[in-house]
Amino acid sequence: MNKKKLIIVLLILLLLVGGAAGWYFFLRDSDDKESKTKEERQRIEISSKDNTNEELTTEKVTEKTTEKNTDKTTESTTASSKPDADWWASQNVVVDNSSTEKTDKTEKPSETTTEKVEKTEAPTVERTEAPTEAPTESTTQATTEAPAHVHTWATRTVTDQDAWDEQICTKDAWDEKVLVKDAWDEQVIDHYDTVSQYVCMDCGTPHDGSNCPICPVCGGGDWKLDDKQTPVYKTIHHDAEYKTVHHDAEYTTKHHDAVTHTETYCTGCGAVQ
C-alpha cells in the first residue's frame, strides 16, 4: 500500500510539473509571436512612411523643374517678340498699336508653350517611376520562388523492436518437507503399584508362586511377605520430525530476434513511400 501511495504522489507531481512547464512555454511562445507582429507592423509603417516621403520629394522636384522650364520659355519668347527700341529708331519705324497687338499675339504662344512643356514633362514622371517599381516586384517574386524538389529514393532497414531474451518459468517455486527423524514409541513410567509378594529372606529373590519352599537361587527355605512398589508403564507416540526446504522457481532463457522492416525514403527531404 505504501508503494502504491508513493507512486500516485509521484505521478501527481510529474503532472503538475509538466503542466507548469507547458503553460510557461505556451506563454513564452505567445509573447514571442506578439513581439514579432509588433516588429513587423513597425517595419511596415516605416516602409510606408519612406514611400510617402519619396513620393512627396519626387512631386516637389517635378513641380520645381516645371516652374523653372516655364520661366525660361516665357523669358525666351518675350525677348524674341519685343525687339530693342534702338533697333526701331535706327530703322526709322514708329511703333503703333498694331505692334503691341503683335506682341500680345506673340506672348500668347508662350502660354501655349508652357502648357506644352507641362504636358510633355508630366508623363516623364510616370515613365521614370513605372520602370523602377516593375523590375523590383519581378525580382522579388523570382527570388522567393524555390526550385521544385526532386526525390532521391533509397531503402533502409527500420528496427521495430530490438532483440530480447525472455525468461520462461519451467517449474514454480515450492517447499519440500525433508524427514529428519522417524516416528517412535517411548515407554514412560506412569505410576507405581504396591504388590505383596514372598521373597527369600537370604537373597531377596521373589517367590515364583510354586509350592516348593526352597529358594532356587540360594537354596534357603525361609520366606517372608514383602510389599514391593512395581512401576506401571505407558506408551507415548512421537511423530516423525521434518524440516522445510524452499526451492526457487526454475527458468529457461528463450532468445527472440529483432523485429525489422524495410522502407523506401527520400535522402533529401526524408519522405517515406
Image (cartoon, helix red, strand yellow):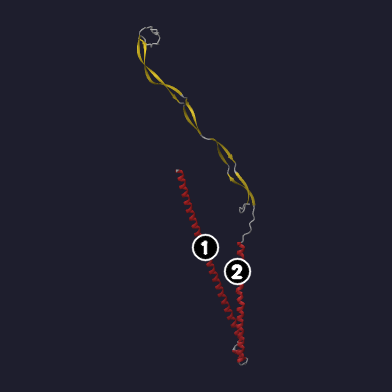
Q: Say which residue label 1 marks.
A: 37
Tell which circle, 2 or 1, labels the residue nearer the N-terminal end: 1
Q: Residue at x 61, y 71 (%)?
A: 130
Q: Relative to 75, is 7 above or below?
A: above
Q: Quadrant of the N terminus?
A: top left
Q: Quadrant of residue 72?
A: bottom right
- Residue with the most extreme front position: 211
Q: Residue at x 50, y 56 (%)?
A: 26
Q: Residue at x 61, y 85 (%)?
A: 108
Q: Quadrant of residue 100?
A: bottom right
Residue 94, horizontal then vertical, whole percent: 61, 93
Q: Say which residue label 2 marks.
A: 133
Q: Quadrant of residue 145?
A: bottom right
The kind of residue on which mark 2 rests is Glu
The kind of residue on which mark 1 rests is Thr
Classed neighbour count for the residue bearing mark 2: other residues with Cα under 10 Å, few (<14), some (14–19), many (≥20): few
Q: Relative to 219, is 31 above or below?
A: below
Q: CA distance from mark 2 to mark 1?
A: 26 Å
Q: Relative to 67, is 164 above or below?
A: above
Q: Relative to 122, is 253 above or below?
A: above
Q: Which element carries disc 2, helix, strand or loop?
A: helix
Q: What is the total number of numbered labels drawn onto the structure image?
A: 2
Between 68 and 267, which is closer to the camera in this rendering? Answer: 267
